[in-house]
Image: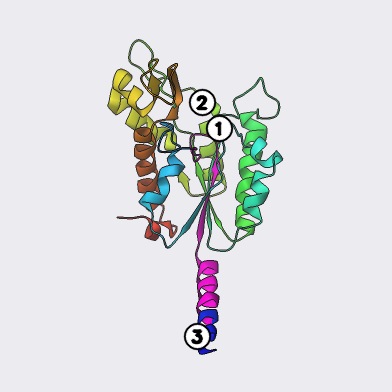
Amino acid sequence: MKKIYLTTIFICLLTFLQAQKPTLFLVGDSTMADKKDPDKNPEHGWGQILPTLMTNTISIQNHATNGRSSKSFRTEGRWDKVYKQLKKGDYVIIQFGHNDQKFEDPERFTNPATQYRANLERYVKETREKGATPILMTSIVRRNFLESGVLLDTHNLYPIVVRMVAKDLDVPFVDMQQETEEIVLSYGPEKSKELYLHFEPKENNYYPEGKHDDTHLSKLGATLTAEKATKQLSKLNIGLEKFIKK
């Protein structure tokens, strides 16, 4: 009986500690999302790397999903799953933009100056309602070099709106557009292919017909991006820094 009693106490204590443990939620698109078959699939989202850079004293839930915009992430009920779990002391990283640009798709497209901004503000407001801390991030850059070697922006107004919302609502902010731009420029027009998915036919078993993708990250690209993200998150001084490995 004593053994059963002690076991019950231990389980209750463990449950209590788990309930007190903060959670970092990630909401966004494919550039942040976890990918299937990580040992075989060369594509990685930067959020997939994040657990290796943080301590086990915080839980991480990556809800980022391929192809989602600030609009479709909500209309599909994905935000509801996060919102229902949110508690005081949690954190939410919000990073949309790549798919909000899909003007040919009414299910995903948002006008950056109106609907996109309103969506970001609503994510921030609802996160704060639960006592959690929202963190806004701009989208990572695409590898889009001109022949001259200039890296051309592809996101137009969307990152500017993120910066505006962060400033106007006093939201912790990480400029991942700038951070990833620095990475890509440091690698240059040709070598930066290693950061994304560039394979000739039969070069990679996962893409036997080859692939040339300048949006989605390789494991190297995802790792460098995650390292940049955690470094900047540490500088925000919002409490998250104590969960990031030195």
Dots 1, 2 in contact, CB < 8 A: yes
Amino acid on which the number 1 mark rests in the picture? Gly
- Any magenta on residue 23? yes
Q: Residue furthest top?
A: 147
In the picture of the structure, the residue carrying the numbered disc 1 is: 97
* Residue 234 located left or right of residue 85: left
Q: Is residue 158 magenta?
A: no
Mark 3 and mark 1 in contact? Answer it, CB < 8 Å: no
The answer to which of marks 2 and 3 sits earlier in the sequence is 3
Residue at 55%, 89% (x, y): give it: 1
Nearer to me, 218 or 238: 218
Distance in Å between CA atoms under marks 2 and 3:
61 Å
Q: Earlier in the sequence, mark 1 or mark 2?
A: 1
Q: Which residues are magenta?
A: 9-36
Name the residue carrying label 2: 155
Residue 221 x %, y %: 37, 33
Residue 201 or residue 80, whichever sits in front: 201
Q: Which residue is mark 3?
A: 3
Q: Residue at x 61, y 34 (%)?
A: 69
Residue 88 picture location, percent across and down = 57, 63
Badge 3 amino acid: Lys
Q: How is the image coloured?
A: rainbow
Residue 175 visible to an observer of this rendering: no
Instruction: Please report whichever mark, 3 or 1, sits nearer to the chain's N-terminal start.
Output: 3
